[in-house]
Amino acid sequence: MKKLFLLFFLFTFTHLVFAQQEIQWMKFEDAIAANEKNPKMLLVDVYTDWCGWCKKMDKETFKDPKVV
């Protein structure tokens, strides 16, 4: 049981240590260039200054540690 607890603790601790703190936004062209070197899925966020839902996404969703 102690080994199982230790394994769980180490897994959780390592995840927290290496977790990203914030989303690193890039310009679209820079993201395409970076994706050629290291292929990953891309999230394209399209917004306007007057959009209330866009502001809500920036304030709540993109600050959520589960999303980051």
Image (cartoon, rainbow, N blue to C red):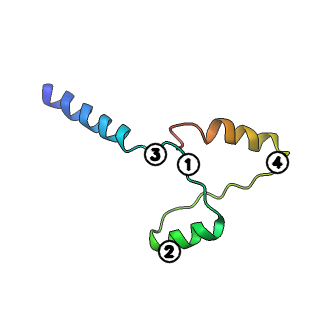
Question: Answer yes or no: do the residues labelled 3 and 2 have beta carbons within 8 Å?
Answer: no
Question: Answer yes or no: do the residues labelled 3 and 1 have beta carbons within 8 Å?
Answer: yes
Determine which of the numbered discs, if any, sits on residue 49 in the image. Answer: 4
Question: Answer yes or no: do the residues labelled 4 and 1 have beta carbons within 8 Å?
Answer: no
Give the residue pinned by disc 1.
23
Rendering coords of residue 41 (x, y %): 53, 62
CA gap, disc 3 to disc 1?
Answer: 7 Å
Query: Eyeballing the image, is 8 above or below 53?
Result: above
Rendering coords of residue 27 (x, y %): 65, 63
CA gap, disc 1 to disc 2?
Answer: 20 Å
Determine which of the numbered discs, if any, sits on residue 34 in the image. Answer: none
- Identify the element where label 2 is drawn: helix
The crowding category of the residue bearing disc 4, from other C-alpha atoms within 10 Å (few below 14, some 14 to 19, many at least 20), is few
Q: Quadrant of the N terminus?
A: top left
CA gap, disc 4 to disc 1?
Answer: 19 Å
- Identify the element where label 1 is drawn: loop
- Residue type, numbered disc 2: Glu
Which comes before the other along the chain, label 3 or label 2?
A: 3
CA gap, disc 2 to disc 4?
Answer: 30 Å
Q: Residue at x 59, y 68 (%)?
A: 30
CA gap, disc 3 to disc 2?
Answer: 22 Å
Give the residue pinned by disc 2.
36
The crowding category of the residue bearing disc 2, from other C-alpha atoms within 10 Å (few below 14, some 14 to 19, many at least 20), is few
Nearest to the eye among marks 3 and 2: give it: 3
CA gap, disc 4 to disc 3?
Answer: 26 Å
